Amino acid sequence: MKIFALAAIAQAAASSSNWVLIEKRDPVTDLRSASTAVLSTSGEERLVVKCDGVGEPVVSVQFITKKYLGGSNERAVTIRFNQAPPLTLDWEYTSKGVFNRDEKVVRSIANLIAKSEHVLIRAYNYEDQPVDGAFSVAGGESQLRTVFRACGYAFDQPLKSNKK
């Protein structure tokens, strides 16, 4: 485990981006998974794009926080790319994070992240108070492409029609 962490730190240091990529392959089944993540400017939150390669491959976008959000239902999350108008969508909530695995939404968000310098995300805790994360996301496109490839998808095309 320490080797993976050291490799990820070295990769981030050698890269001009703040993204860290982790790729895994199951030695028995050869199923692949990958994730790439960037810490918020406060260091309290993470923006993650992940391929779960077990069963039917699924790519998701996740906003993880140290703050308790509460709930396991769908609620609004607002995301803003650079200075574009904010987008508000329903995401699935966990105790300390939100995620979206809708194919069209994930593809759109990933492509917007790849073209952006900054991303702001606002989720809400169980008291309906905002929990914000600000991210410097420049330079993440190659890591995002790697995550999509791990699930057998091309980054620029619809997920289901491009499985390998």
Image (cartoon, helix red, strand yellow):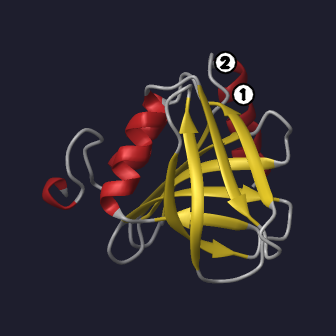
The residue closer to the viewer here, 45 or 12, is 45
Can I make out residue 23 in this image? Answer: no
Q: In which quarter of the image is residue 134?
A: top right
Q: Residues within 10 Å of mark 1 (few under 14, many from 20)?
A: few
**CB under 8 Å between discs 2 and 1:** yes
Instruction: Specify the amino acid type for callout 2.
Output: Ala
As drawn, which residue projects farthest toward the bottom? 72
Q: In which quarter of the image is the N terminus?
A: bottom right
Q: How many angstroms separate mark 2 from mark 1 (CA)?
A: 6 Å
Residue at 85% from the left image edge and 41% from the top image edge: 43
Task: Find residue 1 and name its label.
Answer: none
Q: In which quarter of the image is the C terminus?
A: bottom left
Q: Where is residue 149 in the image (x, y as percent from the top left)?
A: 33, 47
Q: Position of residue 20 (x, y in %)?
A: 64, 37
Instruction: Tally the marks.
Output: 2
Q: Position of residue 132 (x, y in %)?
A: 76, 48
Q: Where is residue 91 in the image (x, y as percent from the top left)?
A: 53, 67
Can I make out residue 112 in this image? Answer: yes
Residue at 20% from the left image edge and 44% from the top image edge: 157
The residue closer to the viewer here, 143 or 38, is 38
The answer to whether residue 103 is left or right of residue 5 is left
Q: Name the residue under label 2.
A: 14
Secondary structure under the numbered disc 2 in the rendered image: helix
Above or below for 41 versus 55: above
As drawn, which residue projects farthest toward the left? 161
Secondary structure under the numbered disc 1 in the rendered image: helix
The residue closer to the viewer here, 107 or 128, is 128
Q: Name the residue under label 1.
A: 10
Instruction: Specify the amino acid type for callout 1.
Output: Ala
Q: How crowded is mark 2: few (under 14 residues within 10 Å), some or many (20 or more)?
A: few
Residue at 58% from the left image edge and 52% from the top image edge: 78
